[in-house]
Image (cartoon, rainbow, N blue to C red):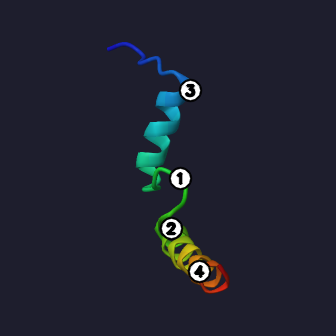
Amino acid sequence: MGVVRRSPQEKKAVSCVRDRRNDYGENDKGSRKSIRRIERIRRVIGAVG
């Protein structure tokens, strides 16, 4: 039984999985809110352009 040495990138990946975060480092609520915000911004830009 030895100590597993991980690179900083591996540590970050394990931490995100453990925290149940997405690829952008957001929790589930953050991604839900950001999707709505992005869609709202796209609609505004589409109406103007």
Instruction: Identify the residue position indicated by label 1 in the image.
Output: 24
State which quarter of the image contains the C terminus: bottom right
Q: Earlier in the sequence, mark 4 or mark 1?
A: 1
Amino acid of disc 4: Gly
Instruction: Identify the residue position indicated by label 3 in the image.
Output: 8
Residue 33 percent coordinates (x, y): 55, 76
Secondary element at tag 1 = loop
Residue 43 percent coordinates (x, y): 57, 83
Residue at image position (45%, 55%) is 22
**Horizontal side of residue 1 vs 38, given as left or right:** left
Q: Earlier in the sequence, mark 3 or mark 2?
A: 3
Instruction: Identify the residue position indicated by label 2 in the image.
Output: 31
Residue at image position (52%, 29%) is 9
- Disc ID at residue 46: 4
Density class for disc 4 (Cα within 10 Å; few <14, some 14-19, many ≥20) is: few
Density class for disc 3 (Cα within 10 Å; few <14, some 14-19, many ≥20) is: few
Q: Nearer the viewer, residue 3 or 48?
A: 48
Amino acid of disc 2: Ser
Density class for disc 2 (Cα within 10 Å; few <14, some 14-19, many ≥20) is: some
Amino acid of disc 3: Pro
